Image (cartoon, rainbow, N blue to C red):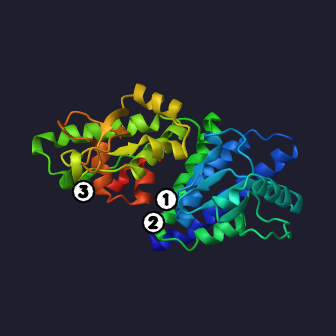
Amino acid sequence: MHFKIGELKRSIAESFSVIGNYLTITNGSGYTDFNSDAERFFIEILNVTYNYALRDVNCEKPNFPAIDLADDRRRVCFQVTTSGTNEKFKETIRIFKKNKFEEKYTKLFFMILNAEHSITAKSDLDTEIIDLTRLNRDIGGLSDNDIDYLDKYIKEYLRVRDNSNLGMNHGITYTLGNAQKFIEWANVDPSDEGNMREDLKALAIKLSELNNAQRVYVNFLVNSGHTPKTGGFWDREDHIYTPTDLEQQYFTGLKLFNSLKALDLVKLDDDYDQHGDERYSTAIDIYFRGLVPDFNYIAKIKSFLRGETNALRRVFINCDFSALN
């Protein structure tokens, strides 16, 4: 990997140049349809680069005021814009304060989709500017594996835009790999190894056919869900349960839940008793079962990857199953 890392960094820089120039020109011409796709595209890059778990708040409420992306746990949010001007900065701060977002978020980032910006204005809020030049520099400080992953992710995005004009809203290409380590870890009967490979391929295809909002929702349920090991549900270690109250804090959720329910990926459990003390609640149970009996692949993948956020994101959002190799 080391011998080609310089080439990968140059490739990312060139891709950012293409994206930045395209957005600048199209926005200058009054064409802004590409902007919402760009916001979703940069979620993964920002998450990997700065170890956040950002979500697109515009998926929950169209034209969400002042901010586009948010990580509620880290209490940070992003305004994503091609307008790196003082006027844009001041207007965003005004709307941010009007909605009292400073009570929920401790830091507001401005992600400027250009190589540079002209913002000189200041605020009493904790703000930070990230343009494409700064982002490219920060990516250069990541591990070789992360740089390689981001280069592939960016190239795939540009390929999808060029070939289908669907952006990140629609199905994507999946990467399967051989999942040898996962299969060995799962310790299934040798006669089931072939079935397991077929099941993993079926799951990869199913996830790749979801749109971006659905995959983000799946990833949230996997990351935020609880795998019972004690209490009333101690015998359900192949499940992942997410209380609906928690889900509603992050998603309006109903349409996303119903769309995944129709695909047999989620169901509701009305009698979830996490602690075994009869404090029952309603929870979402996410699962994928195939040819191997009594084997929930989604829960098992989370356990195999030890709940590592970046690895889970790559599997469930980017359909990159090479993490199981």
Residue 13 visible in this rendered orientation of the protein: yes
Please determine whether, in this image, residue 62 is positioned above or below residue 314: above
Question: Pointer 1 and pointer 2: residues touching (CB < 8 Å)?
Answer: yes
Question: Pointer 3 and pointer 2: residues touching (CB < 8 Å)?
Answer: no
Please determine whether, in this image, residue 18 is positioned above or below residue 271: below
Question: Pointer 1 and pointer 3: residues touching (CB < 8 Å)?
Answer: no
Q: Which residue is mark 2?
A: 145
Q: CA distance from mark 3 to mark 2?
A: 18 Å
Residue 173 visible in this rendered orientation of the protein: no
Report crowding for label 2: few under 14, some 14 to 19, many 20 or more residues within 10 A (C-alpha): few
Report crowding for label 3: few under 14, some 14 to 19, many 20 or more residues within 10 A (C-alpha): few
Quadrant of the snapshot with the C terminus: bottom left
Q: CA distance from mark 1 to mark 3?
A: 20 Å
Q: Disc 3 or 2, which lies upstream in sequence?
A: 2
Q: The residue under label 1 is which amino acid type?
A: Tyr
**Residue at point 44% right, 40% down?**
244
Q: Nearer the viewer, residue 193 or 276?
A: 276
SS of the residue at dot 1?
helix
Residue 200 lies, in percent from the top left, at 30, 41
**Residue at point 36% right, 33% down?**
268
Q: Which residue is mark 1?
A: 149
Q: The residue under label 2 is which amino acid type?
A: Asn
**Residue at point 73% right, 45% down?**
35
Residue 189 lies, in percent from the top left, at 10, 44
Q: Nearer the viewer, residue 34 or 13?
A: 34
Give the quarter of the image for residue 103: bottom right
Q: Disc 1 or 3, which lies upstream in sequence?
A: 1
